[in-house]
Amino acid sequence: MLTGADVAKHNSSESLWMIINGKAYDLTEFQTNHPGGQKILLKFAGRDATEEYEPIHPPGTIEEALPADKHLGEVDMSTLLPEQKIIEQAVPKPTTAGDAPMTLGACLNLDDIEKAAERLLKPKAWAYYRSAADDERTHNWNRESFYSVRLRPRVLRDVTTVDLSASILGHTSSLPIYISPAAMGRLAHPDGEKCLARVAAAHQIPYMVSANASVGFEELASQAKEGQILFYQLYVNRDRAKSEDILRRVAKAICVTVDAPVAGKRERDERAKLDDEAASDPNMQKAVKSTGPDAPDAPQDEPSQGIAQALGSYVDPTLAWHDLEWVRKASGGLPIIVKGIQCAEDAALAAKNGAQAIILSNHGGRQLEGAPSSLETLLEIRKFEPWVLKKLEVWCDGGFRRGTDVLKAIALGARCVGIGRPFMYSLVFGDEGVNKVATVLREELAQNARLMGATSMTEVVPSMVNARELEQNVYNGPYESPVRALAKL
Amino acid sequence: MLTGADVAKHNSSESLWMIINGKAYDLTEFQTNHPGGQKILLKFAGRDATEEYEPIHPPGTIEEALPADKHLGEVDMSTLLPEQKIIEQAVPKPTTAGDAPMTLGACLNLDDIEKAAERLLKPKAWAYYRSAADDERTHNWNRESFYSVRLRPRVLRDVTTVDLSASILGHTSSLPIYISPAAMGRLAHPDGEKCLARVAAAHQIPYMVSANASVGFEELASQAKEGQILFYQLYVNRDRAKSEDILRRVAKAICVTVDAPVAGKRERDERAKLDDEAASDPNMQKAVKSTGPDAPDAPQDEPSQGIAQALGSYVDPTLAWHDLEWVRKASGGLPIIVKGIQCAEDAALAAKNGAQAIILSNHGGRQLEGAPSSLETLLEIRKFEPWVLKKLEVWCDGGFRRGTDVLKAIALGARCVGIGRPFMYSLVFGDEGVNKVATVLREELAQNARLMGATSMTEVVPSMVNARELEQNVYNGPYESPVRALAKL
Amino acid sequence: MLTGADVAKHNSSESLWMIINGKAYDLTEFQTNHPGGQKILLKFAGRDATEEYEPIHPPGTIEEALPADKHLGEVDMSTLLPEQKIIEQAVPKPTTAGDAPMTLGACLNLDDIEKAAERLLKPKAWAYYRSAADDERTHNWNRESFYSVRLRPRVLRDVTTVDLSASILGHTSSLPIYISPAAMGRLAHPDGEKCLARVAAAHQIPYMVSANASVGFEELASQAKEGQILFYQLYVNRDRAKSEDILRRVAKAICVTVDAPVAGKRERDERAKLDDEAASDPNMQKAVKSTGPDAPDAPQDEPSQGIAQALGSYVDPTLAWHDLEWVRKASGGLPIIVKGIQCAEDAALAAKNGAQAIILSNHGGRQLEGAPSSLETLLEIRKFEPWVLKKLEVWCDGGFRRGTDVLKAIALGARCVGIGRPFMYSLVFGDEGVNKVATVLREELAQNARLMGATSMTEVVPSMVNARELEQNVYNGPYESPVRALAKL
Amino acid sequence: MLTGADVAKHNSSESLWMIINGKAYDLTEFQTNHPGGQKILLKFAGRDATEEYEPIHPPGTIEEALPADKHLGEVDMSTLLPEQKIIEQAVPKPTTAGDAPMTLGACLNLDDIEKAAERLLKPKAWAYYRSAADDERTHNWNRESFYSVRLRPRVLRDVTTVDLSASILGHTSSLPIYISPAAMGRLAHPDGEKCLARVAAAHQIPYMVSANASVGFEELASQAKEGQILFYQLYVNRDRAKSEDILRRVAKAICVTVDAPVAGKRERDERAKLDDEAASDPNMQKAVKSTGPDAPDAPQDEPSQGIAQALGSYVDPTLAWHDLEWVRKASGGLPIIVKGIQCAEDAALAAKNGAQAIILSNHGGRQLEGAPSSLETLLEIRKFEPWVLKKLEVWCDGGFRRGTDVLKAIALGARCVGIGRPFMYSLVFGDEGVNKVATVLREELAQNARLMGATSMTEVVPSMVNARELEQNVYNGPYESPVRALAKL
């Protein structure tokens, strides 16, 4: 058995050892292939990286990534030197919103939970969850695009009881809402995605598990309740065999994410990593101080990739429409959900290619700055390819925070709505936090439906919304339906 | 006769006594049924709650709510222990607007009065009056929707004299304005709604009394001047008998509020109550300090309901169009005003169902975030159901603060306009404050009418406003007139 | 000859004497008729009010207002007691813009001059010049309405020389610009309007003298250069005889202001007066401190009128279209300019009633909040009554600050543009300041015309501007041409 | 050989000597002809001005400007008195953005580089690069006009490889990007434009050299790589002979800038010069303190011209369309690029007059406030003169900062896009900075193209953008095609 001192000597790029979960690994050869970059490995060279490693790597990552001879075996953890342990404290910090609530009890809505999370999460976790592409305009627009849509409530209807349930791919959800797939739950809470799965079961709403979940799908599946609606979000890997293996373990439906052939430019995430590295690297700190216009020849590093870039490198950029057939077969005929549709043409293609559901989504504004909000794409489909709404289920995500946001999408034809970041933020409070998000949405939906004069989701119809302001900017240029094109073949 | 010490012993949920107006009551059994929540009762357990109770409960509330055996009789108030008296001071406080005027003389307009009220009212009163639904966007939009409407003034007309009077349901009001119904006037002034009634009489404008007024309608009616125009705003209670009883006592017209089958989510109000409870509860204060992500299992309370939620639970969510017939009969054939119309379809239904007036209103933005402003609904009626404007009187409320706001609505066809919050805010200055609001509006209206070239309200016509910017966003989707539908039956 | 002590005794409303320009007056009976209110008189009771009186009263005001027996004769000014002299210092003060220039040399544009004036003018002068109606939205909109109009410059034209002159009512102005009428120039500089007249002559641009100028028209006329273009702005007084008297003395054209039958609500101006009174009145200061919600019965004064209200009371609200005939005759057939047209109907009426020019104006946003900007009215005339542009000269004012602003109006058909506040602000620097404004405009116009590819004002044509954004909000409702109506008669 | 003391005596306007690059010059007669004004010369009278002179004058300027007898010969620089050397330190300064990065490594995008430059450049350099016309609204609008254009990305296309190259006037550029012409590179870095030329060569993108480059074109040309694409931007000088001389030395194409017959009003630049002069002139500092409204007769200087005004005076305002023929001949038949087209009419005229490319440009918002953004002009051409897009190459510049900005222009028909200020800002970091800008753009373009589903620039088509919001404000007024007009001749 190795001692702390044995490992501590291998603390440079010449020989780079690291301890994870009580075992040592030799990363000397691997270091330049690390999707998260070499620099972060050097920070932990000769040290125990468990706390850092755990929440951002799916189980088994290092075991699969390294050949057996680089597995150096167990370390006697009682022999670790003090400097080999790096423990980062999550200390409450000032936020951009001065009035951020600190307790779940003080959170009245989903924005409160976001503010609390900004204050309570570790900076790296906050940066990963919150970050979006480029200048985050699309992220913000997702939210703002609801504001211009006015409701048209009806009065003097008996609204004593209201039924909020929705039929989603044949399953009954108690709300027209599902938990969107998002990675790295353990950045916020040791139980990570397990909290999401438990609360989804309790609320009888679907949970779509991310391929990058920090808790393995098997582990989540094994704790699932009878009849729980779990979907699996697939990033089709460059390694197809690996994908097939995952697919076979999946339950009720497969989601293929199509808007991420490469990862978006998430600068908040990248900056968090730069800060992290700068904080730990004395040489770098020095560079920050002395490099300037008078030192143009000082060595300049390539900007570090954030967590998103590291995760993104697993995705297959060759994925194309015909691959849906392969997904269907590989998954044994499970319903297919195509996530990331952003124009009417692709909605039509998804329908033609046999998808059971599409998710109008710009990936929470994390991929392409300038992409339309899901409401805009929904209006575009209503304009150019209205038949799609009958052929398959249209789901929406991106910026939904209030009950009225959800009802606006439902009124315009969406079957249900995915909520992502708010659930991730709520993980800082564990199960209770996740439950709070679901409960707030349930209460707001019930109240708002009543105030609109609707007693069920089917009564929420197009004439209950005035989306004219948004419609005036729906695409108006040259349009060629790919279905007509296909029909000609 | 009980002593302070007798009551002081019953200071917990096991045995919960309270003193109100010199009498003690046993609330042990009632505590979980209190619409305002149990927690606030515990705050006053064993104490004198008169000052807190008075302004937010209509007269007789506790007497009616408790069975006779819980009336414990009089208390010798000279024996009260110091800690049994809780007196909250209203201390002038900094406001969001740094330049808030502190005297009525320094108030030049209705916004000044709002700023003064923010500074001078008790926090709970300010929160109740000011709060609006969700993120308060509809509240703000009510105000902003006037800004895009441009006036088209006419010059070189003789405007020496200008007649501001309006005929409202056959009564002559000296202004095209009435006081909107709002609850809890005694939060701002000991005389509460009595101030409103007195000034309305002096100015010869209608006052619509809220069903939740903190002064009983009988008391207000008994001080009414000869010929004073009082309307009664009815929240049809779950207890119909109680409603009928109220209706029989009413004078000139009945207003049925239809946009509040449940109360809106008024977070400012809820937060004020949370603050209030936290300030008084040492255990809670502790929780605020220690609960955080490291203490996810700490007990979490349901968010407290504000005053609005407590009041809202009296409303009947089963109310429907056919109930207007019952209201008419129960009131002995009084004219019916339907308050809370938010789309053209419902305006048509109100006309069909025999209403004499409708109020285009989103409840001051307090109910459904995303509802249209009254100007928008007015334009929608002009577009889809213009006949309604001839069949009944159309009134508007929500965000009116300036003479020009009123004239814009009049020009587009409104008969008169309701002013709510400004009058409630002005109560902080008593009768003089209320008079100031009416006087400022009178002066602005006279000046503005002259500058528009109009010498009476009938000369304020559609061609005097340019509402094109607003019209461009009027609903344009599928429209089916409910009147045509009814005609087919 | 009276002594200071003689006057000092009459320092209350019972007996109210005042010294102006070395003479004493008895204002005891007059005090309640003072258009500026009684309170300000009490402030100066028994004292020398010359410094306060001078800049805000046209010459001869007090002599005409008081009967001969109230003229008490000369005072030996060497005998004045120290407390009889009230001298207000104009001390440079912080401004809303932190970077206000302090010297004329540091002023690069008209906004700089405004910022300097805010800092250097006495508060009362700044408030009077700068104030606008209500919330000053129309004032701000005047400025903003230029921003949405895009230019369409032409390149590769020979622009070596550019002719900026314009023909205005048959006179040649060196710029398509005139100085708008504004009152109270002596608030900023001892020479007051004389500076404006001198610089207008030097630049060969028209100067329209205000009826409320703080320098008499005779005095201005007497210093006029040969051929100088002076217009006279007439507020038709309640006293017609007085108007006729003024008209007979006038030279090149008469301007009838039609948008001010009553003065607008200029709250900045009113607040300045309130501040002024509060500062001087110890009793009032006390009231400010102690009056609050707990003192609802404290005496409340009517809000003081600012300078604008005081001036406004001279205007005749009975003025109507047929009075233009009287103006023409009374002035001996001078061309008539109608100032304050705000809709196409009135533009047509002005043409029908024989006006030679109209000024599209909302009085600098000082009268009716919600009025259209002059660009909007110009577009409305182009839409509904385009013939008016050929029948008479259309001038514009309100918010013009840059050379491009002027060119936009010229391109859309305006003959010339009035500049008001910038010239008033510039008076703080005397002749040099006024000259700076004219010079900056000249330089910007020359440069901008060249960059647009125009070498004279007649080459600035409609296709050089893209006003589509503004056009989309031009009035679109019911329109009945008054000319057609008149034609039927 | 002269000594420092010899020169130091000639330190006033009576006799004004100056040292530049070790040689003395007599500027006594020239001082009033200096395009940059006399005042700045007086600041350096009797002193060594090399550091100030060098970066803002093209090589040989003073030698050509002064007759031989004013060349006083070499100075023994070891004899300079301390006060003869004026060395300005560029000290990092606070910026408007609090979070400006200080190192190139911390810069993730082009805005970061701008923020770093604001902090690290000398104030005068920052002012010159950053300044724009008037209130800089057009400068800002250039940037904002991208935000309203939404992308319409396509998914499930194989985007493994993406080709970013573009054919520009027959040359292959590795990116659809060129470096825009801008003057005074040596203000930021001693190597100045040489850095731009080197990095353009390394990246195989075109570099358009400014006529006002602070490094001579010969020097740049002499270090050019084999096949490097250099264009030359010609400001046709008043001295035509000089222009012809320059033209003959040029390589691949000639750019005629047509939007600068006079320089724009760049107030940031002018203020920087005012600050500079005030800082050095004790008399002026005194004036700043004492001049105010009480000193209206204090001497007032004309506002100083900034660098832009000084440079602008070399441009020929008589340049017209027929001169393109002269340019063509003088350059020996090189392709002609017309830079500064701002309306569809002029695009058509450029095509008619034989231009090979036009650049839709408003000179980075530096010339005419109110000019359209290049995207707007592109949409206008698509509407009125679509044939132009086939007849010649349409390039765009102004406000491009992100990969998606570039793709939006490409989708709407632009061949390539010019990047100006970011490259100038990046000079503060020398070659590495310039390389960073090119590299960031390359990475963003590759990533964004993939996310849009495009694998080459030709796949970026009109249906990939939704520009409806912008289209709604495209010019809609009277339009007469100059081509039709020409056809009639």
Image (spheres, coloured by chain):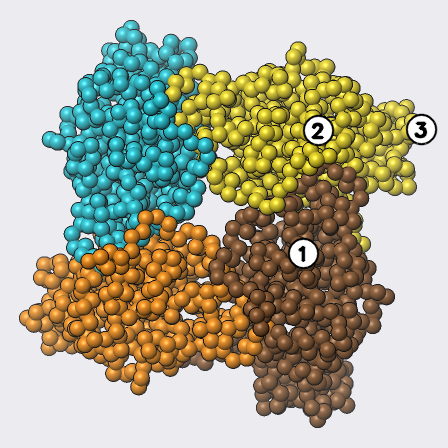
Chain colours: A orange, B brown, C yellow, D cyan
The Cα–Cα distance between marks 1 and 3, rounded to whole angstroms, is 56 Å
| Number of residues whose C-alpha sits closer than 10 Å to that of mark 2, classed few (under 14), some (14–19) or many (20 or more) | some
The Cα–Cα distance between marks 3 and 2, rounded to whole angstroms, is 46 Å
Instruction: Please name the residue that numbered disc 2 is placed on.
Output: C353
> Is the Cβ of the residue at disc 1 closer than 8 Å to that at disc 3?
no
Instruction: Please name the residue that numbered disc 3 is placed on.
Output: C69
The Cα–Cα distance between marks 1 and 2, rounded to whole angstroms, is 34 Å
Residue D40: percent from left, percent from top: 40, 21
Which amino acid type is shown beneath numbered disc 1? Ala
Up the image or down, C21 lies above or below A326; here it is above
Judged left or right of residue B36, residue B416 is: right
Judging depth in this view, the residue of A170 and B97 nearest the camera is: A170
Quarter of the figure with the C terminus of chain C: top right
Mark 1 residue element: loop
Residue A382: percent from left, percent from top: 38, 60
Residue B313: percent from left, percent from top: 60, 78
Judged left or right of residue A330, residue B325 is: right
Residue D30 visible in image: yes
Which amino acid type is shown beneath numbered disc 3? Asp
- Disc ID at residue B414: 1
Of the residues tagged 1 and 2, which is closer to the observer?
2
Judged left or right of residue C273, residue A58 is: left
Q: Chain of mark 3?
A: C
